Image (spheres, grey):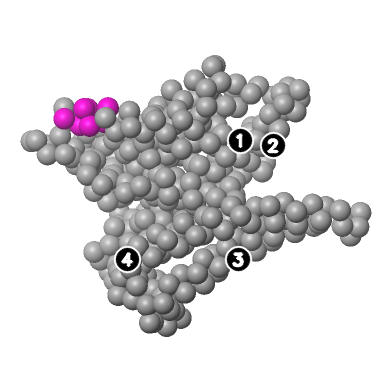
């Protein structure tokens, strides 16, 4: 128990150090432009967190990032690199929108919302199915397959969208009213104008479920075993083929669930242009910062959302791309710190205090 607490604390410390170092590096850029970094960061957090309307925007973006982040972490824990979160998110949103058109208008909300969420998850899993089958049966590399599958999915969805789009537009008709999630502004009028909605509760539930699965279930143990050492897991009786399918299909379903935030909580339909804005790819960065810990995905997603939404503040003092630069620096520093973390864990494990 003490060892696990030490490792968890060390993981948190490494991630926090990476974030602080990235902010310090960004501060040098701001300083080079003749401004006070502390003042800029204070304004950044005051604008994104101190004003309810902007906080709603941060929550909206963090919700999608939480889904794509936990999706990437789910696959990474099993030693599988799912780079297809972007396409799986698109497919989940499109499936959710189609299901919202197919349901009868009289469908009650307690039935409609779970069914549409299930459709989003099924769409994401379907998008991950070809790479999963190829990896499990032929051993082909999942990085290439999931990455290339993104472009296939974009083209297929574009083709299908032409059949259901509203009069030559690039969006589907709106889903039924019962399938729409309330905006946060319905509970806090000060958030009026933001896209934050109750799908954030789905993201918290998804992260909690994944955390429980890995910590308390046999399936989670087998996935972790495969991720730690595939050969040893196979000798222990774990089916590598089954775990490969589960990890990629489960990861795709989690990414697809992010479509509920976009369709049920925001646009109420599928909009092709700039629909996810790279949030499928950014989810990989969220998983890296969280070190594949499902609970840590939530604050990591929130941090990346703050940096992303802070572009207007950075633009006044340096460049609006500084937020993206900081995100990249966080990723690099987290990766670089991995060796330090592994060495520190090894020293803790040798500590006589655990005897």
- At 57% from the left and 63% from the top, the residue drawn is 18
Residue 264, x across and y down, in percent: 29, 45
Q: Nearer the viewer, residue 339 or 304?
A: 339
- Using the image, determine if residue 23 lies above or below residue 173: below
Residue 74, x across and y down, in percent: 55, 40
Segment tinted magenta in the rendering: 156-162
The residue pinned by badge 3 equals: 17
Asked if disc 2 and disc 1 are in contact, CB closer than 8 Å, the reply is: yes
Asked if disc 3 and disc 1 are in contact, CB closer than 8 Å, the reply is: no
The residue pinned by badge 2 equals: 228
User: Which of pointers 4 and 2 indicates the residue nearer the eye?
Assistant: 4
What kind of element bears circle 4? loop
User: Which of pointers 3 and 2 indicates the residue nearer the eye?
Assistant: 3
- At 45% from the left and 59% from the top, the residue drawn is 327
- At 61% from the left and 35% from the top, the residue drawn is 79
Most extreme residue toward the front is 32
Query: Neighbour class for label 3 at 10 Å: few (<14), some, many (≥20)?
Result: some
Q: Left or right of 254: which side holds 346?
A: right
Q: How far apart are marks 3 and 1 (CA)?
A: 25 Å
The residue pinned by badge 4 equals: 320
The residue pinned by badge 1 equals: 79
Is 157 part of what is drawn in magenta? yes
Q: Distance between the residues labelled 3 and 2?
A: 25 Å
């Amino acid at each position: 128990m003490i060892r696990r607490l030490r490792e968890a604390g060390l993981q948190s410390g490494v991630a926090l150090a990476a974030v602080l170092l990235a902010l310090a590096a960004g501060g040098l850029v701001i300083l080079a432009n003749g401004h006070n970094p502390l003042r800029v960061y204070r304004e950044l957090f005051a604008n994104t967190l101190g004003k309810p309307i902007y906080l709603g925007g941060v929550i909206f973006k963090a919700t999608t990032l939480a889904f794509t982040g936990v999706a990437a972490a789910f696959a990474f824990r099993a030693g599988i690199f799912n780079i297809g979160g972007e396409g799986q998110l698109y497919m989940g949103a499109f499936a959710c929108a189609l299901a919202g058109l197919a349901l009868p208008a009289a469908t009650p909300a307690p039935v409609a919302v779970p069914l549409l969420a299930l459709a989003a998850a099924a769409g994401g899993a379907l998008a991950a199915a070809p790479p999963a089958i190829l990896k499990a049966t032929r051993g082909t590399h999942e990085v290439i397959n999931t990455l290339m599958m993104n472009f296939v999915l974009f083209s297929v969805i574009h083709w299908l969208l032409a059949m259901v789009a509203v009069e030559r537009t690039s969006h589907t008709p709106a889903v039924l009213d019962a399938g729409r999630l309330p905006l946060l502004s319905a509970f806090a009028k000060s958030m009026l104008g933001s896209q934050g909605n109750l799908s954030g509760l789905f993201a918290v539930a998804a992260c909690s479920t994944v955390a429980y699965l890995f910590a308390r279930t046999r399936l989670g143990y087998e996935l972790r075993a495969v991720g730690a050492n595939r050969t040893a897991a196979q000798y222990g009786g774990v089916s590598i083929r089954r775990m490969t399918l589960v990890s990629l299909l489960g990861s795709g379903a989690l990414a697809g669930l992010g479509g509920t935030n976009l369709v049920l909580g925001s646009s109420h339909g599928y909009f092709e242009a700039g629909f996810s804005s790279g949030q499928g790819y950014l989810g990989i960065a969220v998983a890296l910062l969280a070190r594949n810990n499902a609970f840590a995905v939530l604050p990591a997603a929130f941090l990346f959302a703050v940096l992303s939404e802070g572009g207007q503040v950075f633009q006044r003092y340096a460049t609006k791309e500084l937020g993206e630069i900081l995100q990249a620096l966080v990723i690099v520093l987290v990766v670089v710190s991995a060796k330090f973390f592994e060495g520190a864990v090894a020293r803790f494990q040798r500590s006589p205090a655990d005897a």
